[in-house]
Image (cartoon, rainbow, N blue to C red):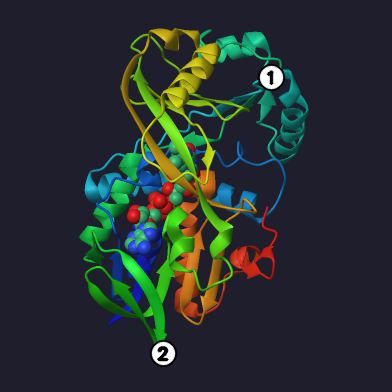
């Protein structure tokens, strides 16, 4: 019998397990796949706490708080496990992809600048100066100096290493088919037999709804497939992530590598990168950084972002001791350290943290957390 069974070993499930371990509980982390296959390993790794928001709200505040943890977290992974998650605070440049996007970007700029005067519009010479002339100027470009990034693959591997080192029980290639209440605890029917736990946390990413079909929230949870290219260009040296309002972004990685993301296909759970997606990413990226036309394609991959119809996470206790923590969409990497601690606190104290109140499921939707 476990104290807590966590379904899903992406960044959300593992951050929660890692935080719960601090309280000395007996924890099981269950995943139907081998590590490396899903969203957490496939992400761009942007810590876009400001890039992603255009108004104040609970999620914006949480994103800022979570972003601020990465510097220390990266040091801890280095010290404890000799793993470098490649944290960088190189800043982000956000640009209007076309004229129609200018009003929305202008209003986001007004919001961000009113909270943080370091967020500034960039003139053409200022953009040239910042990026050594590699980025094509657009009518509206804003500089967000405090947004950073990590290597999502390495960060997720580091969390896995931490879970393994702590001796948390892991069940790989073990699919949970059903969760049912048995008196004061839960029984999980899995492909490897029954697992019993006092509490269960469903952190199954885009697939969480399938496991909770008997609950009203099931249809609210879906997935948005995204495709990504990884290219190399020895002559290109920029520190900043460049993010276009049409969703295409270029994230500089170590060794002159650049991650170009990402397409968005709603309700698509398929695996693989289409020719159309590859072409779109290449076209958009080279329109913004022309020298990328001469880059070498190293790899391409896809992943499915956990999405909810209201575009904000669902973090709720559905039944006494049964929690669902999902729907972090484009920001699961960014939010994971804070979510891990908050959910662990909730499970231990049996009291929902105030910060998570906006994400409970209410009749007809989710609370307003934006
Ligand atoms: C292309 C792309 C780019 C992204 N870029 C960024 C970014 O720059 N910054 C950012 O913050 N976020 C980004 N994201 C989003 C981020 O990756 C996700 O929000 C985050 O990884 C979600 O983590 P998770 O643990 O909820 O889900 P996942 O990583 O999908 O993990 C869920 C796990 O649950 C398991 N599972 C599901 N059902 C069951 C079951 N029944 N039984 C057992 N196991 C089960 C799955 O096998 C999976 O391993 C991006 C995502 C994609 C796809």
Residue 257, labelled with which disc? none
Residue 199, image x, y percentages = 40, 78
Q: Which mark is residue 98?
A: 1
Front residue of 77/321: it is 321
Residue 201 position (above or below residue 48) = below
Is residue 267 depicted above or below 13 in this figure? above
Residue that label 2 marks? 184
Other-residue count near label 2 (Cα within 10 Å), few / some / many at <14 / 14–19 / ≥20 = few
Q: Secondary structure at mark 2?
A: loop
Q: Are marks 2 and 1 in contact (CB under 8 Å)?
A: no
At x 70%, y 19%, the residue is: 140
Looking at this view, is 324 or 348 the one in front? 324
In the image, taking residue 286 as reference, residue 59 lies left or right, namely right
Measuring from the top left, give residue 264's x and y in whole percent.
53, 36
Residue 204 % position (x, y): 41, 59
Indicate which disc, 2 or 1, sits on the residue closer to the N terminus.
Answer: 1
State the quadrant of the N terminus. bottom left
Q: Quadrant of residue 110?
A: top right
How packed mark 1 is, by other alpha carbons closer than 10 Å (few <14, some 14-19, many 20 or more), is few
Disc 1 is placed on an element classified as: loop
Between 27 and 197, which is closer to the camera in this rendering?
197
């Amino acid at each position: 019998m476990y104290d807590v069974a966590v379904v899903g070993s992406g960044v959300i499930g593992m951050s929660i397990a890692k935080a719960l371990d601090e309280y000395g509980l007996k924890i099981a982390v269950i995943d139907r796949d081998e590590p490396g296959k899903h969203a957490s390993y496939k992400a761009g790794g942007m810590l876009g706490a400001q890039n992603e928001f255009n108004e104040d709200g609970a999620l914006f505040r949480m994103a800022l708080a979570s972003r601020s943890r990465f510097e220390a977290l990266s040091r801890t992974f280095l010290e404890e496990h000799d793993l470098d998650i490649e944290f960088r605070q190189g800043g982000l440049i956000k640009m209007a992809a076309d004229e129609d996007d200018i009003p929305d970007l202008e209003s986001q700029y007004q919001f961000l600048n009113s909270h943080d005067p370091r967020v500034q519009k960039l003139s053409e010479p200022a953009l040239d100066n910042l990026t050594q002339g590699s980025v094509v100027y657009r009518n509206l470009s804003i500089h967000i100096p405090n947004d950073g990034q990590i290597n999502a693959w390495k960060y997720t591997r580091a969390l896995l290493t931490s879970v393994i080192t702590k001796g948390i029980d892991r069940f790989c290639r073990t699919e949970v088919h059903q969760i049912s209440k048995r008196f004061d605890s839960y029984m999980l029917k899995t492909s490897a037999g029954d697992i019993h736990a006092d509490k269960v946390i469903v952190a199954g990413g885009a697939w969480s709804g399938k496991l909770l079909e008997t609950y009203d929230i099931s249809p609210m949870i879906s997935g948005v497939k995204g495709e990504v290219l990884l290219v190399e260009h020895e002559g290109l040296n920029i520190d900043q992530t460049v993010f276009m309002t049409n969703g295409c972004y270029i994230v500089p990685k170590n060794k002159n590598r650049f991650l170009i993301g990402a397409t968005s296909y709603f309700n698509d759970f398929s695996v693989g990168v289409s020719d159309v997606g590859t072409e779109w990413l290449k076209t958009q990226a080279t329109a913004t950084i022309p020298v990328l036309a001469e880059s070498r394609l190293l790899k391409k991959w896809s992943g499915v972002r956990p999405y909810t119809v209201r575009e904000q996470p669902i973090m709720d206790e559905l039944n006494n001791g049964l929690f669902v923590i999902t729907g972090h969409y484009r920001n699961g990497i960014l939010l994971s350290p804070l979510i891990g601690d908050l959910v662990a606190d909730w499970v231990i104290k049996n009291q929902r943290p105030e910060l998570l109140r906006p994400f409970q499921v209410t009749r007809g939707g989710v609370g307003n957390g934006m």
